[in-house]
Image: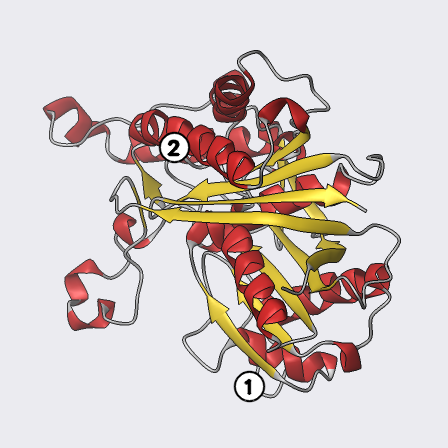
Amino acid sequence: MKQAVISGTGLYTPAQSITNEELVTCFNAYVEQFNADNAGAIAEGTVTALEPSSVAFIEKASGIKSRYVMEKAGILDPKRMVSHIPERADDELSLQAEICVAAAQQAMDRAGKTAADIDMVLVACSNMQRGYPAMAVEVQEALGIVGYGFDMNVACSSATFGIQQAVAAVQSGQARAVLVLNPEITSGHLNWRDRDSHFIFGDACTAIIVEGADTAKGAHRWEILDTKLKTSFSNNIRNNFGFLNRFDEAGIGQPDKLFRQQGRKVFKDVCPMAAEMIKDTVTNAGLEVPQISRFWLHQANLNMNLLISRMVLGRDAEPQEAPVILDEYANTSSAGSIIAFHKHSEDMTPGQLGVICSFGAGYSIGAVVVKRL
């Protein structure tokens, strides 16, 4: 069977970022105004007063210190609290496709590939800007790639699920090389007025080139030894936004049309599932956990990653064993584990092993075992 490798990665990081201090200042201004406007109802007990947030609360709960966003002024306006980005005409490159192209060009450069070398484009992320045409087909056109493209959504696990699809395409001969893209504009699905989640997400886009080992020529190549995927239905992470919302006007604009989660339940459920998935994938690859030098985990919550790595290793992971980027980027959904891989893999030497693992809504979990060539 043809061997598939990761031959290049790319990362698009927005120019604007928001610190926890900025976010808390805005959120607390909103809370103060809400409580003042509803003082009478709060006193009567018909409306619940909102609680302010704090930098200490955010960092203890998540480990997040800042996040990148496509547009920050709208988010930091207490009267708006959502980005303001004008719609583009149909004949203009869409926002999501634009960040895909930026990340793709970097990955192609690192892999030493041109558009003529790629046969398949896969856009895999938590939210698509539109229903159709597929974002992947627009990106394909923008890059000048001849072949085919399609979109897929497995929430925060989309990148690892996408890598598995790319491996299958390469090994079956459907594609010589596959471009996997994870354009996560998560600021669009976040309820910036919700104390429990307003700090969680950030925007970014990652790109991965998967191709046959016989054609790979990038300086940093990784043999894909095994992949493993799992899904198990849960409502504990959910977003009800969709094209059928207009059937019932009463629900339009309600909080359930944005990201929401039962955080404690997610923590309790997902940590052991992810740890078991990592161990199973390593075993399936004919390896043992002590042979793994690095774990590039989904970057949702620092406490989750500390626990998962402890469950896998039987001890606390050293910082270099399970790199953290969520302190700077926050939760970038499917892009997070790939950002960690992109930023913290070049120092590894030929023969060293690692695991890329992502997990999230669905529930969904994907793991990829790789070896540095």
What residue is disc 1 on?
90
Between discs 1 and 2, the one toward the N terminus: 1
Q: Residue at x 67, y 44 (%)?
A: 370
Q: Could you classify mark 2 by the number of other residues whose Cα lies within 10 Å: few (under 14), some (14-19), or many (20 or more)?
A: some
Check disc 2 and give the amino acid type: Met
Q: Nearer the viewer, residue 310 or 93?
A: 310
Q: Does 145 sit above or below residue 18?
A: below
**Left or right, 230 with reference to 247:** right
Mark 1 → mark 2, Cα distance in angstroms:
42 Å
Q: Residue at x 63, y 69 (%)?
A: 170
In the rendered image, residue 149, in percent from the top left (x then y), is placed at: 56, 78
Residue 340 lies in quadrant: top right
Q: Residue at x 34, y 44 (%)?
A: 363
Residue 141 seen in this snapshot: yes
Q: Nearer the viewer, residue 230 or 127?
A: 230
Check disc 1 and give the amino acid type: Asp
In front of the other: label 1 or label 2?
A: 2
Q: Nearer the viewer, residue 337 or 274?
A: 274
Q: Does 169 sit above or below residue 273?
A: below
Residue 316 lies in quadrant: top right
Residue 146 lies in quadrant: bottom right
In the rendered image, residue 176, in percent from the top left (x then y), is placed at: 70, 74
In the rendered image, residue 136, in percent from the top left (x then y), is placed at: 57, 75
In the rendered image, residue 291, in percent from the top left (x then y), is placed at: 67, 27
Q: Quadrant of the N terminus?
A: bottom right
Residue 95 seen in this snapshot: no
**Left or right, 38 with reference to 260:** left
What residue is disc 2 on?
273
Q: Could you classify mark 1 by the number of other residues whose Cα lies within 10 Å: few (under 14), some (14-19), or many (20 or more)?
A: few
